Amino acid sequence: MSQSDAEKKVLDGRVWDEFCDLLKEAGKVVQSENAPDDAFNKAEGYRYLTRLLRAGLESFLEHGDQAFPVLRCPVHTTIKIGADNPDNYYQNASIDPQYDYKITGNRGTVDYLGFSTVISRYGSGGGMKTTGFLDSREIEIAGDGSLEIIVSQKEQPGNWLPMGPETNAINVRQTFQDRKGEEPAEILIERIGSDEDRPKPLTPEQLARGLAGAAVFVRGTSQLFEDWAESFVPTTNEMAAADQAYCQAIGGDPNIFYFHSAWQLADDEVLVLEAKEIPECQTWNFQLDNWWMESLDYRHHTIHVNKHTAHYESDGSVRVIVSHTDPGLPNWIETAGHNDGTMCWRWIGASEHPPVSARVMKRSELAQG
């Protein structure tokens, strides 16, 4: 869109009308034929769209200037996307492969720190392709914890994070085993070789592009993960290994092996998951999500468990119990008012990926067993 066209749309109000029309179209995702048709799940679906809108506006309008990138937290307690990991602190910045960038900061003590450059096409339903990856085990870190990473298309000495010719974003995952006991990495990103020290004021073209990008992001992202949730239905109440190639195509971490499925429990039922073998790994976790693949509210409910927080059986195995009410047993995962949704198990940094079994039983049977 040219600057003159953008100015006309701003002056006559079409820029806002088109934005609102795109948002109205996104609402159809909640009414998808195979999505839950009860008021509770639909209410969460519409709230989900508002959360995606906040994420989209932050990304495309407020922080869309790739010449002055900002590492911000796009997914957190009230913005949730694609089975967001409650153990993670996510960061993201828009970048342009014509520039080179420098990441600086301090490693902290967080258990896992990974950087990836990506081609993000959530808005078009194209997912997210990784173009470069680097985790803290590969990074040279000074004795005081400081680090420096160069992000560029051309290979650089030292810590180098590659970009491709279509790269448009950088993602950072910080994964905690013990949030209270670990310190997050403190990092910044800046463009290399610029004489400018601040962004220019907003232009009509930036406004038009930012609003359109945010609205398309809402529509594309919600449809992408609603379609994926529908694909889990055949393995409801099983802990099924996901299509790992697809997981990577939509932004998964290369160090993670994913299990994804749907779950559904009547009021008197529980779901028992058993990991008979825990592989050598950096960490692992399990979480319960709603239909829209949002992690349930982990601020107020225990909806996930990991390598650090889990209770282990005497033989080293793990049993996790998903139940509406407290069964009085270890590793209870709360349904937080839900009777159905999706779920995810991750082996992180593991060379082997043993299966996890799942079975539904009556709450009374669990008490007897």
Image: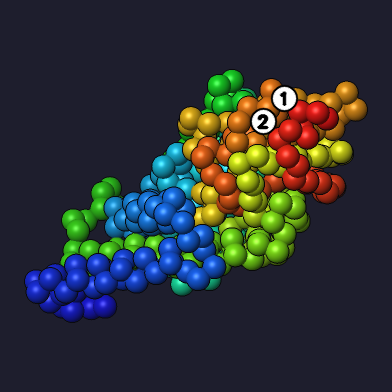
* Residue occupying image coordinates x 81% and y 28%: 368
Up the image or down, 111 lies above or below 359; here it is above
Horizontal and vertical percent for residue 52?
A: 39, 55
Q: Residue 332 shows which numbered tag? A: 2
* Residue occupying image coordinates x 75% and y 42%: 361
Up the image or down, 117 lies above or below 350; here it is below
Residue pushed farthest right?
315
Determine contact: label 1, label 2, CB under 8 Å: yes
Q: Secondary structure at mark 1?
A: loop
Q: Indicate the amino acid at tag 2.
A: Trp
Horizontal and vertical percent for residue 212?
A: 30, 68
Q: Indicate the amino acid at tag 1.
A: Leu
User: Between residues 296 and 111, which one lies in front from this camera angle?
Assistant: 296
Can you see residue 139?
A: no
* Residue occupying image coordinates x 18% and y 79%: 5
131 relative to 48 in the view: left or right: right
Can you see residue 368?
A: yes
Query: Would you identify the image quadrant in which residue 201 lies?
Result: bottom left
